[in-house]
Image (cartoon, coloured by chain):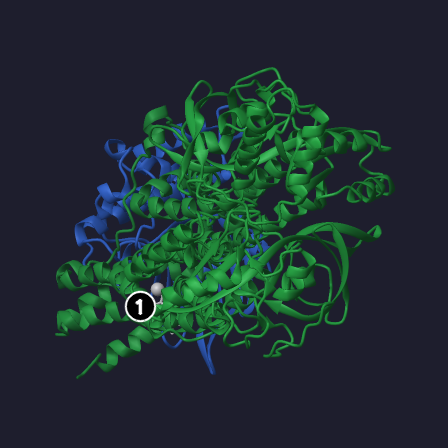
Amino acid sequence: MNFLSQYWRKKLIGDIKQQKLLFSALFFLCIFGVGSYVSLTMGYTNLYASLDKIYATTNFADVEVNTHSDIWFNISEIESFSENFSEQNPEIGTIDFRLLATSGYNSSIETKDGLRFQLTAGRAVGFNCSLSQTEMINGFIFANGENSIPDLDNNSILLEAHYARMYDLDVNDSLQTRINGNEFNFTIQGIVYNPESLIVIPSRHDFLPNNRFGIIYLPLKTLQEYTNLTGLANNILVKLADDLPDETRSSIISGFYSELNLYANNSFAPPVFQEYQVSNWALNMDLEEIQKISIVLPILILGVASIAIFITLNRQVQSQRRIIGIASSLGYSPNDILLHYTSYSLILGILGSFVGIVLGIIVSGGITWVYAYFMGFPTIISIELQLGVILSAFFFGVTVTFISGLIPAVKANQMSPREALQGNIKVGKGRFSFIEKLFRIRSFRIRFTIPLRNLFRQRSRTIATIIAISASVMILVVSGAFNDSVNTGISRQFTQTSDYHLTVSYDGFKFADLGLIDDIDFIEQLEGVESVDAVLEIPSIIETSSRKEEALIIAWNSSSPQTHNFQWTSKEDQLLPNDSIILTSGLARTLSSSTGSILSYGYPRIPYISYAFWAANVTWNLWYTFGEDRARNETLSYLENLITQNKERLSFSSNAEEVKFSNADITVTGVSEEIWSTVAYTTVQTLTEAMGIDIFKNSHLDIDLSPYSKLILKVKNPDNLTILENIKTEISSLSEIRSITFGYDFRTSVNLTMAAFNVIVAIFLVFACILAGAAIFTTIHINFQERSRESATMLTLGLSDQEFLFIITIENLSQTIMGILGGILPGLLLADWILSNALRLFYFKIIVSPQTWIILWFGVLLIVLISQIPAIIQGVKMDLAEVTKEISH
Amino acid sequence: MSGLNLINLENVSKFYTMGEVKVSALSDLSLEIDVGKFVVLIGPSGTGKSTLLNLISAIDTPSKGRILIEGVDISFLTRKQRAQFRRHKIGFIFQFFNLLPTLTAVENVEFGLALVGVTNSSGSISYDSKDIHATALEWLEKVGLTHRVNHFPSQMSGGEQQRVAIARALAKDPPIIIADEPTGNLDYRTGVKILKLMKELNKQTQKTFIIATHNGQLAKIADYVISLQMGGVETYDQIPKEDLDNLIW
Ligand SMILES: Nc1ncnc2c1ncn2[C@@H]1O[C@H](COP(=O)(O)OP(=O)(O)O)[C@@H](O)[C@H]1O
Ligand SMILES: [Mg+2]
């Protein structure tokens, strides 16, 4: 086939050569559009593939079943039950039993003030070390590349890699560990990754990734011994046969679970499927974000590219109408002409897509690697070429450019020779601008009338330019607003709202009259302590008639917390009233509730609520057993005994389904503006009443068994680290303390969580700037070429270079200003949407700082000024004699 | 000759280098032009007429020799000075009119005026838009375009556009009017009318007109003819004999 006759082929090359810069800009846009699609899509696909690979290597459990907290099962009993079940259900692959215990660690971290010791929370996992690495469910990947589990004696552990990285720990280092109130000095025998902690999130309700949460792995026997739980475990991992359909999978598991609970007297919390396993769930949410961006960003860039190609080719056809005319009168077929002009965009599309794909592949490796590095993945990440992505990128890129070049090409094709041969090209007729008509401006000013008329001369092009600038500005506003809102939100949360310096977490619940009040008394008299609040944190489900949201209810021991200042949007005094709830603003928004709304709340399907139930049962039974007249002290000591001895299997009957609290309805009395979108506040009295565990308090014994999970402390002088460390040391001597966290460490974790987003924001910023630059550059360039004759005329008539520059600049600046104005509102709306919906755990009120506005305006204007430089240089270099005499340019 | 002439060219040459090849567009040309003359520059295509006009109007600089305008050597002016020179000393009339398409007839004239200002009744230079507008209107009247004041170039015929261009060139009161093939893009009758207008304005204003054309017939209406030939140059004064209306070309 004669693709293009020689003449047209030469001309095509000539066209491209003649407008190298313009072609490069378009080329660049194509590369960027296609490249961003390829890199992001392959990036997240590779990350998914890496996850799969890691999960396959480590035998990631399909399902996990836990007992309700502080309940254990006898391994040999459940083992025989499982064997029976597996025999009848061959879809069950393997089943492992583990013992999970809460633990705490004392590790040092290097800070600018020297070494600091931190008492951090964690988990000890007792696993069956007689299994080989390949048989084990939720097995390990060793950081040093080892593939077998070393022999572990009574003093050896494997340490989860994130914690090791955080505290700079390595093999043979020792780790001071607390389990069950006892201190151990373990030797680290291996640094390991585990599929259940690729992102370390302690539980669905400790919503932040937390590299300070230490997970250690030790032989089951050792942990049983250290926790006095010989022969017992509390965690079942199930690996199913490969490639089961989802339905079979869930029916097998629900069968397993219901028989198990029947057998074990309802001791087990509902099964957690792999999809909802907290680390995997969080990772998938992240990757979904990247997936969304990988679609939105390329569409935006290619959209701008197609506008630019359309403008360019349209103009080319216009300016070459004489050539087209001559060619068609000489007998070239319309198809030749059509082919010629579509070839231009095809070359652009094919070359751009090709280079975009190549660069995209390279960058995708980078994205995968950087993400994996920051998330702390093991190094077995998988980077593969995805043919599907490459082909679709190519198709996508070529189609978009081809279609945007098609319309001008068809126009050229349909031009009659007579029409084509007309000398002067139409570069937009002069007309009075709308503004002049509106304001009845009659006087002529070179500097303003000309640029103004130019803007209105080819309205569609001006609009296209403005849209392209608006698109960039939109991205800039989103990035800037994101950054400002997050920073302002976080800083306000930690300086004004959360007014604390230390939090102390208990192993489980601490009951008021069973130690908590003593602890508070002890802490309050420590030097430097200003005030102490005790809180009960209960994960719950809050519902309105139309919406439902999982949230953490934080209940305070008094109606006026010392360590928290509610940021009321609709209420003046700081009192937390009883029988009512305060929503954080994000939660209020997701529930579309406000002050005065009535909500109902209850337990979600989560395990560790049972302690409270248990307490309720015990107190209820006590009340019956001893009656009202038994001495208070005697009762207390009985309870205390019961709790220290609770390591035996307790009979426990809770309905594992979601339940509502008995006193389920509650009124919203205020909305506090905070960064959490899944937190609500109330008083302990209100919550315990709702949970039905305030029974004992109502009896004549007046024993307060309200459960608490945390203490929150404010000190007098937070900058005095010595006093702070002292307080910490004193508190760590109390019993059942699991972790002590400094307020600023928590703030650092929040910042770290947001850091990943900030990277994305920065990438977006760069994209936006380039987009704005390319868009402006193409239009300015084309405008300039089309108007070279009139520019030459103006210069010939004696217009100075400065005045000429001024005219061009005014025109471009006005377009830019309109573009900026047009991009601000959609940008703010989009930012608001992202800030309030996309982040799930956080809610940031949209704020754009004056600095950001200034940077935005100046930045965009500067980009425009820079983008017009090549065109202006061209203008100034123009051969006036020639250009003023040319028929067309 | 003495330096009192309006335009003096002394041994002016212009070369263009196109890659390796050196093209000579004008070689060793000397001539003088007096104030108020209606000069016609004739000669076949490619003999350097446009080149000469470009040199006189400081659009281009000579490769050799000197060009004195009102006694000032313009051969070594900077880009900025040349723009200033063109602004004040030269009125341009182009073959393709070169009106600014976004400006109306009167605004095109105002464009020229705004660059230099107008002399108002008190004799001082004014950049006031009212004064400029008034002067522009006067000039449109002089070229017979009162009915097209607020029309854009796209709404006017070629002849009308060239009239606007003439008004634009003359309104700012420059000593020299340069016109390169001013009738080249007009039909015969219109061309004649335009030439008539220029001739009339030359008489009225006593400005020096230098008009390039490849049509020898036009020499008949010139005060002074510069005939560029492939071989060299020939100049002569001439008393116009023929009536403009009888010109044939
Ligand atoms: N910019 C240029 N580059 C190279 N050669 C040129 C250029 N301008 C004019 N010439 C050459 O100079 C000579 C004179 O051209 P020109 O002054 O345009 O002639 P005329 O106006 O009499 O037709 C011609 O041979 C032409 O090819
Ligand atoms: Mg010429």
Say which chain is green.
A
Q: Where is residue A649 in the image (x, y as percent from the top left)?
A: 55, 49
Q: Where is residue A245 in the image (x, y as percent from the top left)?
A: 29, 64
Name which residue type carries label 1.
Ser
- Residue labelled with disc 1: A392
Quarter of image, res A693: top right
Total numbered circles: 1
**Chain under numbered label 1:** A
Compared to A666, does A27 lie above or below?
Answer: below
Image-quarter location of ligand 2 = bottom left
Q: Which part of the image, by quadrant, shows the N terminus of chain B?
A: bottom right
Compared to A376, does A587 lie above or below?
Answer: above
Q: Which part of the image, by quadrant, shows the C terminus of chain B?
A: bottom left
Colour of chain B in the rendered structure image = blue
Question: Residue at the location (55% across, 27% down)?
Answer: A624
Q: Front-most of B85 and B142?
A: B85
Q: Position of residue A144 (x, y in %)?
A: 65, 76
Compared to A828, does A7 lie above or below?
Answer: below
Q: Front-most of A635 and A559?
A: A635
Q: Dot 1: within a 10 Å radius of its alpha carbon, few (fewer than 14), some, or many (20 or more) residues? A: some
Q: Where is residue A601 in the image (x, y as percent from the top left)?
A: 44, 30
Question: Residue at the location (30% across, 41% down)?
Answer: A430
At mark 1, the secondary structure is: helix
Q: Is residue A491 left or right of residue A59?
A: right
* Visible residue check, residue B217: no
Q: Front-most of A238 and A333?
A: A238
Quarter of image, res A525: top right
